[in-house]
Amino acid sequence: MEPSIGITQDHLTSVSHALNSILADEFVLYAKTRGAHWNVEGPDFHSMHLYFESQYEALQDMIDDVAERIRMLGHYASATLHEYVELTHLTEETVEPNTSEGFIKSLLNDHDTIIIHLREHINYFNDKLQDAGTADFITGLMEKHEKMAWMLRAHLK
């Protein structure tokens, strides 16, 4: 049964397509953060290993929230690596050498890209697609990325 929540089916479809792209970005960033956790080397290994773990755990929750938002709107969440690679705004680049600074710069760039992408969608969801709930949802998501980016940026000072 399709949701009848005051948003047209066409708008729900448009929102869900955009959210699947956001889901792809979140998943690619999660995978890259997990890779940083596994592969970081250097004198700060232990602290950065734990730090990257806290970051990917937060991203895991964010991924679940985005997928569940898509389902709430009556659509299916993308769930394959192939779809994520096609839909993401990020790259799967690897960092050499595997230092904390290299990973931090790469992940920070990805967070900033996601923040910009989310910010661009707030008014689109609210004004054009009449979905204040999703506009609010991605505002909260953007704020989480802003905090994570701030923490990464603080490591570079």
Image: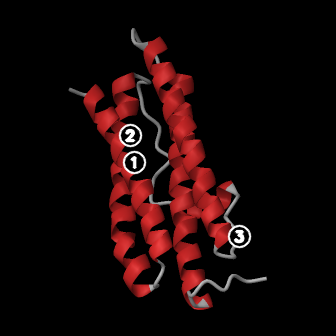
Q: Residue furthest left?
A: 157
Residue 4: give x, y in percent of width and height. 66, 86
The answer to whether residue 139 shows anywhere in this view is: yes
Whether residue 27 is visible, yes or no, is no
Q: Position of residue 85 (x, y in %)?
A: 58, 58
Distance from disc 1 to disc 2, alpha carbons, whole Å, reads 5 Å
- Residue 149: which quarter of the image? top left
Above or below: residue 30 compared with residue 142: above
Q: Which mark is drawn over residue 148?
A: 2
User: How far apart, in angstroms, are the residues tagged by discs 3 and 1?
Assistant: 24 Å
Quadrant of res 76: bottom right
Image height of 99 relative to 44, above or below: below
Q: Amino acid at mark 1?
A: His
SS of the residue under disc 1: helix
Query: Where's residue 140, x and y in %?
Result: 42, 56
- On-image quarter of the C terminus: top left
Badge 1 is on which residue? 145
Type of amino acid under label 3: Tyr
Residue under label 3? 76
Left or right? Give the position of 113 relative to 12. left
- As displayed, is residue 75 above or below residue 118? below
Q: Is residue 126 above or below residue 54?
A: below
- Residue at horizontal 64 percent and vertical 75 percent from the top: 73
Q: Nearer the viewer, residue 40 or 136?
A: 136
Callout 1 touching callout 2 (CB < 8 Å): yes
- The quarter in which the N terminus is drawn is bottom right
Q: Decide: few, some or many residues near mark 3? Use Cα within 10 Å; few <14, some 14-19, many ≥20.
A: some
Residue type at tag 2: Met
